[in-house]
Image (spheres, grey):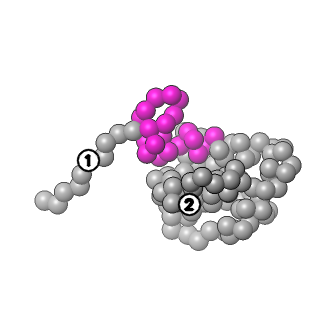
Amino acid sequence: MTGNGYIEIEIGGKPVGLRFNMYAIEQFDSVKGNNSYTKNLTTIVYAGLLGDCFAKQSEPAVSFGDVNEWVEAQIFEGDPGGTLNAVADTFLKSNAYIRLTGKGNGEAKKKDIPAITSP
């Protein structure tokens, strides 16, 4: 399901969940920039992995290097199963991405977050 920003894929024979929550978007923003196509895709996948681990309070089952090798293999093979495209679609349609960037379906959906004050 893409609306909630979660997708399960397999990397190096291990099933991993990618959760594009606010934590994942922050991780992606901290690394992206004017980077290469492969680096951005690798960063998106790894950020989703970290977002899922953050939500579950667990350690990643695969390393950044494993993710990079998987992304490169998908690119070289032409993404035969469409998994890389599904990950990118999930990222772009995640509620966190849409709300934090104001992008999505051509409409700005960014909402102001009220300040938290102590009583």
Q: Which residue is mark 2?
A: 31
Q: Which residue is mark 1?
A: 114
**Disc 2 element:** helix
The answer to whether residue 106 is magenta is: yes
Front-most of residues 71 and 3 = 71
Location of residue 10 by image quarter: bottom right
Q: Residue at x 73, y 62 (%)?
A: 68
Within 10 angstroms of label 2, few (less than 14), some, or many (20 or more) residues? some
Amino acid type at image mark 1: Pro
Query: Which stretch did the figure color magenta?
Result: 89-109
Give the CA distance from mark 1 to mark 2: 27 Å
Return the x and y of residue 42 as percentages of the image width and height: 67, 57
Tell me if I can see residue 24 in this picture: no
Within 10 angstroms of label 1, few (less than 14), some, or many (20 or more) residues? few
Q: Residue at x 51, y 34 (%)?
A: 104
Amino acid type at image mark 2: Val
Quadrant holding the N terminus = top right
Q: Residue at x 48, y 57 (%)?
A: 26
